Each structure stands twice: as C-alpha cells, then as structure tokens.
Image: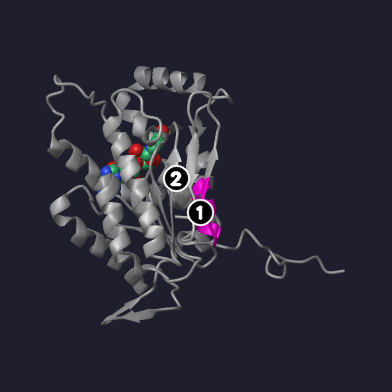
Amino acid sequence: MTTPTPTTMNFISINKLTNTRVLLIGGTSGIGFAVARAALEHGASIILSSSKLEKVQSAISRLQQLYPDPSFTSRITGRAYDLSDQSTLETTIISLLDYATSPSIFPTTTTTTTHGNNEKVLLNHIIYTSGTRPSRIPISPTTTNLTPQLYTQSETLRVLAPLMLGKHAKSYMVDEHTSSMTFTSGVLASKPVPGTTLGAMAGSALGGLVRGLAVELEPIRANVVAPGAVETEIFDELGVQEKEAVKEMFRRGTVLGRVAEAGDVAEAYVWCMKDGFGWDVTESVYCKSSLNYSIRYMNSADA
Ligand SMILES: NC(=O)c1ccc[n+]([C@@H]2O[C@H](COP(=O)([O-])OP(=O)(O)OC[C@H]3O[C@@H](n4cnc5c(N)ncnc54)[C@H](OP(=O)(O)O)[C@@H]3O)[C@@H](O)[C@H]2O)c1
C-alpha cells in the first residue's frame, strides 16, 4: 500500500494559504511578525511593511535565518512605508498596495491581472497590526495635552489607515470570499481602564469601520482581532524593571498565570484568513479581569 503524500491527501486546513499573497502592515515585530511566520509556514508569499527601513530589513533577515530553505526565502519580501502622516496617508497606502501587488517582487509569479495600465498580482489577505504603545491620557481638566488634535493624531495609524486600505481594497485584492482583511484593536476598546479612553475610542471606531467594511467589501471578509496583553517589543521602551512589573501585573490577571506570546494570538489572524465564512462575534475568555482577546468575526449578513 502506498503512503499518501501531502500532495495526494485531501487536506482541508493546512493548504488554505498555499500560493496566496499576504501583505502584513506592521509585520516587522511583535504580533505581526508572528502572523508573518505563520503565513509563511502555511505556504503564503509574504510582504512585510512598517515605517522603519532598518526594521523591515531586520525582520526579513530574521525570517531568512529562521527559514533558510529557498522554498521559504523566495516567498519573503518587504519595504518601509510610514503611515503616521495624515496629509500623505492615502498616497502612501496606494504606493504600498502598488508595491505589494507588483509581479516582480517574488521570483516565481505566475498569475497576473491587468488593472488599468498596470499588471498586478492581486492580494489574498491584508493583516494590519501597525500601532504604537498608547500613552495614558486621563480625562481631566489638568491634562493639558488632551486636545482635539491629539485624538485626530492618535486615529491616523489605528483607524484612518485601515479606512484608506478599505477604500482601495477592491482594486488590489482578489474579489472572493477567500480573501480577507484583518485589523487590530485591543481589549481596552470594550473594557477601558482609567487613562485609556482615547485608545478605547479608537478601538471602538475601528470596530465600527470593520463592520462597515464587511458589508461594503463583500465577498472580501473584514475582521478585527482585539488582543489582551501580549508580550512583544511594544513594551521594550519601558526598560527592563518596569517591563517586568507590567508583565507580572498582566500575569496575575490571567487564569493561566501567563502573559500571551505573539505566537498565541497569531492563531486568531490565521483563523480569520483561512475561514472563508464568518460568524457574528466570537470571544475567547482567557483572563480573570478582562478578555484575553476577542475576534469580531462576521460575514456580510451578520455585520
Ligand atoms: N502587545 C499587546 O499587549 C497588545 C495588546 C492589545 C493591542 N495591541 C495592538 O496590537 C498592535 C500590534 O502590537 P505589537 O505588540 O505587535 O506591537 P509592536 O511589536 O510594537 O509592532 C508594531 C508594528 O507597527 C509598526 N508601526 C509603528 N508605527 C508605524 C507607522 N507609523 N507606520 C507603519 N507601521 C508602523 C512597527 O514598525 P516600525 O516601528 O518600523 O514602524 C511594528 O511593525 C498595536 O496596534 C498594539 O497597540 C497590542
């Protein structure tokens, strides 16, 4: 009897990202980097992007070291695009999407689509994890930096960039139910603690945006993952002692007595890419004091 090989087995799960093109905005560290690894392992060609060139280069080299076989290294690329400037945001997003759909960025590209005068390889998935650690801004008359401008500025990366991506998605993505966009909010959006109201506003606005995108972009799916505390480079700026104290606080708040790693929450993004349908809202409760992460998970009928 011949043993079935991976090519002859009727796999229903692990090949869903094979030969897909996945753009990971914020894929150079933390959660996005873990999703990039998972997508690569599932057979996708991945495009990493974030604001700093050196971070993009470092992420690409780390991936090349982790997965040295040419069958992996030939599927990794990336380029820096800074999405923090509102005045150039839309043109930057268009440049990033043009780059990510360019036929020449991977050595073996077969399928191209002509769109206007340009040849493109349309994207199958966009994962968006760009963000910076929000500062604590108490709602108080003495908080002098709490201004309308501060809120608008804090929205750029968290809400306006996703909005512009949604605006241009139909020109750059395969228009099928197998395609998806997954954005990132946080548990503080639904369970703020004092000082995190601006973050809660941005997270809730993103939730509303994604519900709208799910009905406007169908059959392309739109989801948002809202992680709780995940140990990533986002806490590096705190310094060793404060980072340890913060981690201990998070650890005490969880049922499992551990802080999530990026590889844990990466599974939620993989799920959003691979599942071609969508329910209403699924929430995974991992913490005593708050949700560890919830996934707004919807199809157009439920949004
Ligand atoms: N870790 C947590 O506990 C946690 C919990 C809830 C929600 N979140 C949210 O999840 C997202 C990812 O968090 P993380 O922990 O993975 O953080 P991270 O490791 O710091 O990753 C953030 C990513 O965003 C990119 N980025 C920052 N500014 C950018 C800009 N102006 N334009 C484009 N990209 C930019 C960063 O690269 P560059 O520096 O090169 O730009 C990096 O790739 C963030 O929005 C965060 O707020 C995190």
Q: Examine the structure image and report whether residue 279 is included in the region drawn in magenta.
A: yes
Side of 285 relative to 229 (left or right): right
Figure check: 222 above or below 148: below
Query: Which sits in the foreground, 96 or 269?
Result: 269
Pick whichever, 120 or 164, lies toward us. Answer: 164
Q: Do tag 2 and tag 1 residues touch (Cβ < 8 Å)?
A: yes
What's the residue at 33%, 47% (across, down)? 206
Q: Amino acid at mark 1?
A: Cys
Residue 228 visible at all: yes
Region of the chain picked out in magenta, as a range: 268-281
Quick check: can you spot residue 26?
Answer: no
Q: Mark 2 — residue?
A: 225
Q: Which residue is drawn at the image coordinates 16% and 23% (left, top)? A: 143
Secondary structure type for disc 1? helix
| Residue 111 pos. (x, y %) | 44, 78
Residue type for callout 2:
Val
In the rendered image, the quadrant that contains the C terminus is bottom left
